[in-house]
Amino acid sequence: MNDQLERLNRLPLRTNLRGLTPYGAPQLDVPILLNVNENTHGVPADVQAAISVAVTEAAAGLNRYPDREFTELRGALAEYLGHGLDATNIWAANGSNEVLQQILQAFGGPGRTALGFPPTYSMYPLLASGTDTGYIIGKRADDYGLSAESAALQVKELQPNIVFLCSPNNPTGTGLGLDVVEAVYAAGEASQTIVIVDEAYHEFAHDGTPSALTLLPGRERLIVSRTMSKAFALAGARLGYMAAAPEVTDALRLVRLPYHLSAITQATALAALQHRTALMADVEDIKEQRDRIVSELTRMGLKPAASDSNYVFFGGLDNPHDVWQQLLDDGVLIRDVGIPGHLRVTAGTETETIAFLTSLERILASQATLPA
Ligand SMILES: Cc1ncc(COP(=O)(O)O)c(C=O)c1O
């Protein structure tokens, strides 16, 4: 046990936090950062200018607490999502991580459980332990797929209070059919299970991919979570949101801290929403890079998963950690998600994508020529 852990364990920490390690994707100073699925295209100049003006205006009023209800922002998010939603359906917080945490605070907690289907977003179990919610590990097929039948059966058997469905799933990048969401929702009827569909990456899905937003009418236990961290290139601003029945937003009001969304955050998000044309053009470019990564990795003999996100999960590597390290030595940071034979890479700009592919091909060729 290292010193830090020893000192931590001397504190009267809650039992379910003992031995845990915090979320910690490496933040390294290297030229090409493709490890946490950020939008590497940067904030377009017109969006930067609009944010600067909006933040300057907000600065004049910083002596006052912000609008606790962030009504204008909720209206703008509803307008962006469409599907007949209005401000009463929307809630936001500092990143969708915080939205998910508030959902667990409201609907999870001691004696309650949340079900996730690993490999999936690594924060789900951490958010569960942080709110003293039991985390149940659900099962996927060997190819990491999740069928409606299997997911519904598990919900019926386990009767969790909350289910996380990540679509497209992180780290695999693959989307879930709406039949899975419908089946899980129906299977959770008896246990009154809250169903969260985490659509953090939905904007990167192939054209025509339906959103779980279409399923909201008549389903008061369904929550669709989104973020401005990815398509909107605003990971640094921290704005995540969800759409659900108005009574769900009322439930989250019970657990949110007063004034949790700063006036600066609200102004930034509103400005980006109002100037989203250039941002959405970058999303199209990222989708092209993503598709190129999939076809190039296939050409190299690797096994990329189908991706509806801004990243690609790929298998077929004998020693993924070695490849990860050699890419890093070349100045390219990608993600070792700890799954045997696999790595995950974010689709960046064209230049970054070329650098990644060139470096990877050289590494694979050098491994192939190594004596056995
Ligand atoms: C699937 C998924 N959901 C939610 C998040 C949280 O994003 P944020 O808190 O920046 O909105 C992430 C971040 O990478 C993610 O991959």
Image (spheres, rainbow, N blue to C red):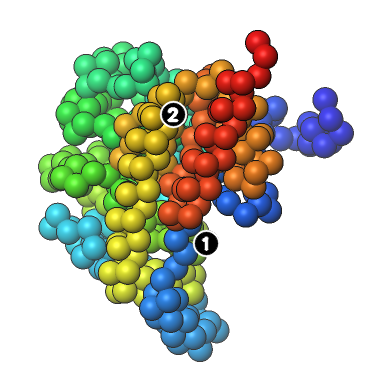
Residue 370, quarter of the rendered image: top right
Q: Amino acid at mark 1?
A: Gly
Residue 2, quarter of the rendered image: top right
At x 22%, y 17%, the residue is 149
Q: Please tell me which residue lies in front, 244 or 304.
A: 304
Label 2: which secondary element: loop
Q: Please tell me which residue lies in front, 80 or 327.
A: 327
Q: Is residue 21 left or right of residue 218?
A: right
As drawn, 312 above or below 226: above
At x 26%, y 32%, the residue is 176
As drawn, 281 above or below 165: below
Number of the label disc, if any, that sits on residue 236: 1
Q: Residues within 10 Å of mark 1 (few under 14, many from 20)?
A: few
- Give x and y (percent) for residue 192: 27, 30
Number of the label disc, if any, that sits on residue 300: 2
- Give x and y (percent) for residue 258: 48, 64
